[in-house]
Amino acid sequence: AQKVTQAQTEISVVEKEDVTLDCVYETRDTTYYLFWYKQPPSGELVFLIRRNSFDEQNEISGRYSWNFQKSTSSFNFTITASQVVDSAVYFCALPRNTDKLIFGTGTRLQVFP
Amino acid sequence: DGGITQSPKYLFRKEGQNVTLSCEQNLNHDAMYWYRQDPGQGLRLIYYSQIVNDFQKGDIAEGYSVSREKKESFPLTVTSAQKNPTAFYLCASSSTLAGNSYNEQFFGPGTRLTVL
């Protein structure tokens, strides 16, 4: 069965600290995608990244980076030099049956000035 | 600007009443979805539709109904049969270009429903 686990319920950091959000997944598919979304206090989910299981290279986008490791079924998300605007709930997600996303329970990140 | 709109942002209803949540998209996406989010939890799929005039139940469809008469619209009705309807409801859409069903979903701003 498809499953996404985000064991960190809440993380608090001080601005400029680096922070890593963990995502562990289970899937029987040989080919799959993984997603990260951000949900700021306004409530709307914002798409951050989609990663194909064939591509295990790390992805970097500005202060954001993602580490995908099939060997440990993990797709972790790191924010470098965190800012107050990064405060949000972050969700990892995995598709099921091609078109339904299974979401983790989310990690609430609080960045204090 | 292309995007997804949901209305209203906040909705209050009395117990026993049906209520309809609106979701409109101008992204020309084929697929649309409704999710429910409870405090401290992830999103759970209520219904989804991959094409006009067709939709499927998600994981928690009981007490909800939908219609997909137009490509850009996917309204959700929360019926009186839904035992615990107070929640945050999110609508999403995605493209299925070239048969790729793993495209990212784009979300609306959500509707917060409170049953009094």
Image (cartoon, coloured by chain):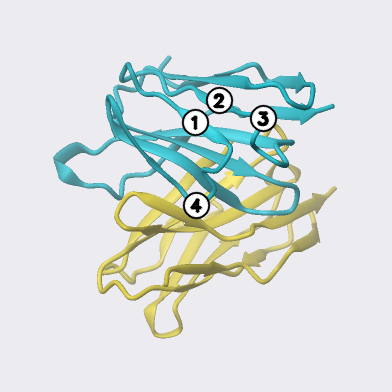
Chain colours: A yellow, B cyan
Residue beneath label 3, please? B80
Q: Are marks 2 and 4 in contact (CB under 8 Å)?
A: no
Task: Give the residue type at disc 3.
Answer: Ser
Residue beneath label 4, please? B59
Sequence order check, earlier mark of 3 and 4: 4
Q: Are marks 2 and 1 in contact (CB under 8 Å)?
A: yes
Q: Are marks 3 and 4 on the same chain?
A: yes
State which mark lies toward you, 3 or 4.
Answer: 3
| Residues at marks 2 and 1, CA–CA distance in whole angstroms | 5 Å
| Residues at marks 3 and 2, CA–CA distance in whole angstroms | 10 Å
Task: Give the residue type at disc 1.
Answer: Ser
Task: Give the residue type at disc 4.
Answer: Asp
Task: Give the residue type at disc 2.
Answer: Thr
Q: Residue shown at 33%/17% (left/top)?
A: B69
Image quadrant of residue B29?
top left
Closer to the camera, B89 or B61?
A: B61
Q: Are marks 3 and 2 in contact (CB under 8 Å)?
A: no
Residue beneath label 2, please? B77
Q: Position of residue A57 (x, y in %)?
A: 34, 69
Q: Position of residue B114 (x, y in %)?
A: 77, 29
Closer to the camera, A16 or A36?
A: A36
Q: Secondary structure at mark 4?
A: loop
Q: Residue shown at 31%/45% (left/top)?
A: B103
Specify the farthest residue to the bottom: A71
| Crowd class of label 4 (few under 14; some 14 to 19; many from 20; radius 10 Å) | few
Image quadrant of residue A41?
top right
State which mark lies toward you, 1 or 4.
Answer: 1
Q: Position of residue A96 (x, y in %)?
A: 37, 59
| Residues at marks 1 and 4, CA–CA distance in whole angstroms | 13 Å
| Residues at marks 3 and 1, CA–CA distance in whole angstroms | 11 Å
Q: Residue shown at 77%/62% (left/top)?
A: A11
